[in-house]
């Protein structure tokens, strides 16, 4: 299946694209940040950026979902960076604020706990490949790595997740 | 286990809260108007595809530009260049300043060490001498003939041409071995006034592989000799008049007589020099070389294809120059870009591991 076949025509409006992929972007950011409140803010930021960049969006290079996930990832990384600087500036000794991870309603507590123990890098590959069901190539495009590296990263993350789930159960 | 895990994760996919959905909808409502009509046709191919298309496009433009420049290059400029090949080693020694207004443009070029237009070179007839102007004229013509038999015929014909033009054969060397390259070197003297006709006929004897000629102005030399002759004649007249007087002492008479003899000798020498100069100007020397050797004929006429090749070669040199000069900077830029990319990746990995 070609990219153009599986993605909406370029004439699709931004509003329609946003409506279609809002949950995907939000879900991805929830998994990446472990914080639903933060994910809401970052999702709003992501769509703000996307609106500014909408004219430059090239549907022949990536689907709109992949493109939005790329923006979401950059937005999240920017936030991580600024947060790290802020923490370093304020008080080195103070431990980072612990957030009670709630990925989604209905998720088993032991899976949620296991997900919370994974790193953001591990969670994001699970989010992209499992939650959003992106194929290896699309996930690779979002992460900026090769599809093979995505496969490796995913299998390691799943293995670790399974181990944590077993331990938590 | 994994499948159960997958199913649960997918089934419990987080859903954006209504507030966020409203927020994004409000944002999307600010969507700018469609891009201008022409922007819809904006090139949206991936970068590497652009490069793949750009390379042949650049090549095509370079070839077209080279062809256009080569084909439309000024003929006058080209003519000089070609004839420099054809007449390399021209022995013209008259300075350009000495060229008189009567001289043709072609001759002026020849005097400057350049040569006549291609048409002249093609016909084998060099720059014509200027009538009424004393000039030493020398021409060299190298021709290729097919075989030894043709060499013999051409040699005989060259002698006939010299005689037909009231000239003579000054020297002749003929070498026609049974095998190998045959050659003949003939020095012909023909009246300068008829040299152009002679050269034209000689050039028909074979394929021109080289041609050069030299012109030296002898008019100044002749004028100088004429002035000295007139001065000497006046001196002799004065001496004769003084010797005709009866009241000069015997010793002075001896001295005057001696001076008169010297002046007469000098006058004879000057007259001889003037005759020699005039005779030299009257006769042109043609050095004709005939050979059976396979030599690529000189590009007297030149070809448009060669011009195109020249321009393309210069374009290639310019490109090479740009690559050599810009190459290190481009390489440095790529290395810096790679280093920054690697650094960014490392930071991202660390951030993703920490969170």
Image (cartoon, rainbow, N blue to C red):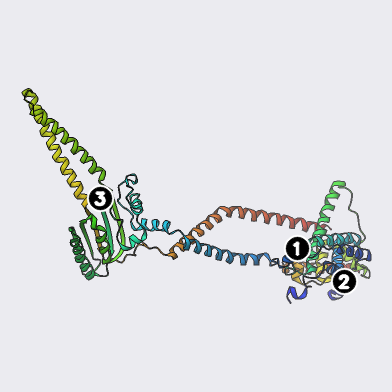
Q: Nearer the viewer, residue A114 or B173?
A: B173
Which residue sits at x=75%, y=63%? Answer: A56
| Tag 1–tag 3 contact (CB < 8 Å) | no
Residue under label 1, please give it.
Answer: A56
Front disc: 2 or 3: 3
Mark 1 residue element: helix
Calculate the distance from the C-alpha at mark 2 to the C-alpha at mark 1. Answer: 33 Å
Query: Tag on residue B132?
Result: 3
Task: Answer with the quarter of the image where residue A100 lies.
Answer: bottom right
The label nearer to you, 1 versus 3, is 3
Residue B273, given in percent of the width and then of the height, sits at 18, 43
- State which tag comes first along the sequence, 2 or 3: 2
Distance (Cα) linking label 2 and label 3 = 111 Å
* Residue A73 placement, left or right of B22: left
Q: Which quadrant holds the N terminus of chain B?
A: bottom right
Q: Which class describes the residues within 10 Å of circle 2: few (<14), some (14-19), or many (20+)?
A: many
**Left or right: where does residue A147 sit relative to residue A162?**
left
**Residue at the spot 22% in from the left edge and 50% down from the top edge:** B281
Q: Quadrant of the C terminus of chain B?
A: bottom right
- Residue B94 appears at what percent x and percent y? 30, 47
Q: CA distance from mark 1 to mark 3?
A: 82 Å
Residue placed under numbered mark 2 in the picture: B9
- State which mark lies toward you, 2 or 1: 1
Residue B11 visible, this orientation: yes
């Amino acid at each position: 299946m070609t990219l153009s076949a599986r993605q909406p025509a370029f004439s699709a409006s931004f509003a329609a694209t946003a409506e279609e992929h809002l949950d995907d972007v939000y879900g991805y950011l929830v998994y990446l940040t472990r914080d639903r409140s933060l994910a809401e803010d970052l999702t709003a930021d992501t769509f703000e950026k996307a609106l500014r960049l909408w004219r430059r969006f090239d549907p022949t290079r990536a689907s709109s979902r992949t493109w939005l996930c790329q923006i979401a990832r950059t937005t999240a990384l920017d936030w991580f960076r600024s947060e790290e600087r802020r923490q370093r500036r304020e008080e080195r000794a103070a431990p980072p604020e612990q957030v009670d991870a709630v990925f989604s309603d209905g998720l088993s507590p032991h899976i949620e706990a296991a997900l919370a123990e994974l790193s953001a890098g591990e969670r994001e590959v699970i989010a992209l490949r499992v939650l959003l069901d992106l194929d290896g190539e699309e996930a690779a495009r979002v992460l900026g790595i090769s599809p093979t590296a995505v496969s490796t990263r995913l299998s390691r993350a799943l293995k670790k997740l399974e181990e944590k789930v077993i331990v938590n159960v | 286990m994994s499948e159960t895990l997958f199913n649960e994760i997918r089934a419990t996919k987080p859903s954006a809260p209504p507030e966020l959905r409203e927020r994004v909808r409000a944002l999307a409502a600010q969507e700018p108007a469609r891009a201008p009509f022409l922007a819809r046709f904006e090139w949206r191919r991936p970068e590497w595809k652009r490069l793949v298309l750009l390379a042949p496009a650049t090549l095509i433009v370079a070839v077209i530009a080279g062809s256009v420049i080569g084909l439309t290059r000024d003929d006058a400029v080209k003519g000089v260049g070609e004839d420099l090949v054809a007449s390399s080693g021209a022995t013209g020694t008259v300075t350009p300043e000495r060229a008189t207004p009567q001289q043709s443009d072609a001759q002026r070029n020849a005097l400057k060490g350049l040569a006549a237009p291609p048409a002249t070179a093609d016909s084998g007839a060099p720059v014509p001498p200027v009538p009424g102007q004393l000039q030493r004229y020398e021409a060299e013509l190298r021709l290729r003939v097919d075989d030894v038999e043709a060499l013999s015929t051409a040699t005989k014909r060259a002698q006939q041409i010299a005689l037909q033009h009231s000239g003579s054969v000054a020297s002749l060397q003929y070498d026609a071995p049974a095998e190998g390259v045959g050659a003949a070197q003939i020095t012909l003297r023909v009246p300068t006034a008829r040299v152009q006709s002679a050269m034209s006929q000689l050039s028909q004897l074979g394929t021109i592989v080289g041609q050069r000629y030299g012109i030296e102005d002898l008019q100044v030399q002749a004028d100088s000799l004429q002035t000295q002759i007139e001065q000497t004649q006046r001196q002799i007249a004065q001496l004769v008049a003084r010797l005709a007087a009866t009241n000069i002492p015997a010793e002075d008479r001896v001295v005057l007589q001696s001076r008169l003899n010297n002046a007469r000798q000098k006058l004879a020498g000057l007259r001889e020099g003037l005759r020699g100069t005039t005779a030299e100007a009257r006769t042109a020397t043609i050095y004709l070389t005939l050979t059976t050797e396979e030599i690529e004929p000189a590009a007297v006429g030149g070809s448009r294809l060669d011009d195109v090749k020249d321009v393309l070669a210069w374009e290639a040199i310019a490109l090479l120059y740009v690559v050599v000069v810009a190459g290190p900077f481009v390489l440095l830029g790529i290395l810096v870009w790679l280093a920054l990319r690697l650094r960014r990746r490392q930071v991202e990995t660390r951030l993703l591991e920490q969170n």
